[in-house]
């Protein structure tokens, strides 16, 4: 009897347990549905942010040969991505308008961790006594500017070639980039010209080629000036001829940053259609004074025409003119730059010639960009002029040479108020490049 009672009770207990499970399941389902409804209704008003950039990338099992004759793959597209305001309205953001704000995190490299730094930009080693100039970051007014991510950049640049084309500011810029990338992998120098003005590096793990090509006019020019800036004759400038120093390599580039400026202010004789057409700053030559405005506009038109009509569709960043900060003279006449903090908005204006050059750049770029969109050319404006104008504190000044006041505290030395200390404000240019590369259409 006892066995029968136990036998009979099992179905009853199982039935009650089954009912309780059904109730629990139904309650859980209702709660889950309610939570999903609340989450979904709230998410309608939220902006969708892209996932954070990965710090590490998985390496492939093999790296393509650096000497391969196979053309590298095409450039990464510039994907669009609008930022969001607090009113949830998609807007464009101007990353070139903003302010320099204090940043206690400091630089991403030092003069000891970077091996490619030229001595003229190695301000710390050369004895610059202050270090406050490295504790600032650029803050756009309408959005955030992420710091350059070297791992992500190298991953995007796998099997590609990036060129910096222009004057010594381009060389200054590429050194900044290499210093940041060296925190991931050291670059291997594989080429330099006789004067070490043009160089090429290779990052073996990524099969990434990086080069700087010195061509201070981008167009044809005969230059009679040594490394110290001493000229023996006027520059002969060919306004209707491109400089093949860089265009002969253009088909190899996936990306290029192009920018010039200051050299057009030098005394020059202009040639067009195989004849002398005029000059800039050439008194006593019995030539028509056309001015640097004429040659600069002519040069940019030739350059943009080449880019927009080339069968090779590289992604090109056009960098605007870089202002200098010489006070009480020029580089050759005792000018100096001894400020220790950035200017604030409204405290400094562009010099007249810089303002003229910038206006020419914006006008010619706008026309080239319109043409480029028709020809499916990725042409982006890298507008570094305004943010650079505010950083008079970021130049080597007298510390372009090693310990300039070691023997005489009152020594008269040549100042450099055009190029930038490394590390220094020019590192921010790479933040801008990276953001334009990854989120190009997000910014105007």
Image (tube, rainbow, N blue to C red):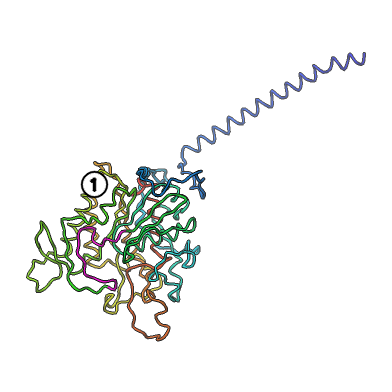
In this picture, residue 351 sits left or right of residue 210: left
Q: How many marks?
A: 1
Q: Is residue 426 magenta?
A: no
Residue furthest left in the image: 286
Q: Nearer the viewer, residue 73 or 409?
A: 73
Image: magenta residue range: 213-228
What secondary structure is marked by label 1?
A: helix
Image quadrant where residue 90 sits: top left
Rendered view: 153 above or below 131: above
Residue at image point 12% right, 64% down: 290
Query: Residue 126, image x and y in percent?
Result: 43, 75
Residue at image point 44% right, 67% down: 134
Rendered view: 19 above or below 43: above
Residue at image point 45% right, 76% down: 129
Q: Nearer the viewer, residue 412 or 212?
A: 212
Query: Residue 319, image x and y in percent?
Result: 30, 57
In this picture, residue 174 sits left or right of residue 293: right
Q: Would you call the spot at circle 1 few (<14 residues within 10 Å), some (14-19), or many (20 or more)?
A: many
Q: Nearer the viewer, residue 365 or 242?
A: 242
Q: Is residue 225 magenta?
A: yes
Residue at image point 28% right, 58% down: 259
Rendered view: 188 above or below 128: above
Image quadrant where residue 370 sits: top left
Q: Quadrant of the N terminus?
A: top right
Query: Residue 247, image x and y in percent?
Result: 25, 52
Our reading of the magenta stretch's main secondary structure is loop
In this picture, residue 27 sits left or right of residue 279: right
Query: Residue 349, image x and y in percent?
Result: 28, 67
Location of mark 1 (residue): 308
């Amino acid at each position: 009897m006892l066995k029968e009672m136990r036998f009979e009770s099992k179905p009853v207990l199982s039935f009650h347990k089954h009912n309780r499970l059904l109730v629990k399941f139904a309650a859980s389902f209702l709660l889950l549905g309610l939570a999903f409804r609340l989450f979904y209704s709230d998410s309608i008003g939220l902006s969708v942010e892209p996932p954070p950039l990965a710090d590490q990338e998985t390496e492939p099992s093999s790296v393509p040969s650096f000497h391969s004759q196979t053309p590298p793959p095409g450039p990464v597209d510039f994907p669009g991505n609008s930022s969001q305001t607090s009113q949830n309205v998609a807007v464009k953001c101007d990353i070139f308008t903003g302010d320099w704000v204090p940043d206690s995190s400091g630089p991403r490299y030092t003069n000891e961790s970077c091996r490619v730094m030229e001595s003229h930009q190695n301000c710390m080693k050369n004895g610059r006594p202050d270090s406050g100039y490295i504790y600032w970051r650029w803050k756009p007014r309408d959005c955030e500017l992420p710091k350059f991510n070297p791992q992500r950049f190298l991953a995007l640049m796998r099997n590609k070639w990036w060129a910096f084309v222009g004057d010594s500011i381009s060389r200054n810029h590429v050194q900044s980039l290499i210093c940041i990338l060296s925190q991931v992998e050291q670059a291997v120098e594989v080429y330099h010209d006789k004067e070490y003005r043009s160089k090429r590096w290779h990052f073996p793990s990524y099969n990434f080629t990086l080069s700087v090509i010195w061509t201070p006019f981008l167009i044809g020019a005969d230059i009679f000036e040594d490394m110290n800036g001493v000229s023996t004759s006027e520059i002969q400038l060919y306004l209707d001829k491109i400089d093949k120093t860089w265009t002969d390599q253009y088909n190899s580039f996936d990306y290029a940053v192009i920018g010039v400026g200051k050299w057009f202010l030098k005394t020059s004789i202009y040639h067009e259609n195989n004849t002398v057409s005029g000059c800039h700053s050439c008194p006593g030559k019995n030539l028509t004074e056309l001015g640097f405005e004429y040659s600069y506009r002519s040069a940019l038109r030739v350059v943009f025409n080449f880019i927009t009509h080339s069968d090779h569709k590289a992604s090109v960043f056009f960098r605007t003119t870089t202002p200098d900060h010489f006070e009480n003279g020029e580089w050759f006449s005792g000018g100096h730059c001894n400020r220790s903090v950035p200017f604030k908005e409204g405290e400094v204006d562009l010099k007249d010639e810089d303002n003229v050059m910038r206006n020419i750049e914006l006008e010619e770029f706008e026309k080239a960009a319109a043409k480029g969109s028709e020809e499916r050319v990725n042409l982006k404006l890298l507008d570094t002029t305004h943010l650079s104008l505010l950083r008079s504190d970021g130049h080597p000044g007298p510390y372009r040479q090693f310990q300039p006041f070691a023997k005489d505290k009152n020594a008269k030395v040549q100042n450099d108020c055009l190029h930038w200390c490394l590390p220094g404000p020019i590192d921010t240019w790479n933040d801008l490049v990276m953001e334009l590369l990854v989120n190009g259409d997000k910014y105007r």
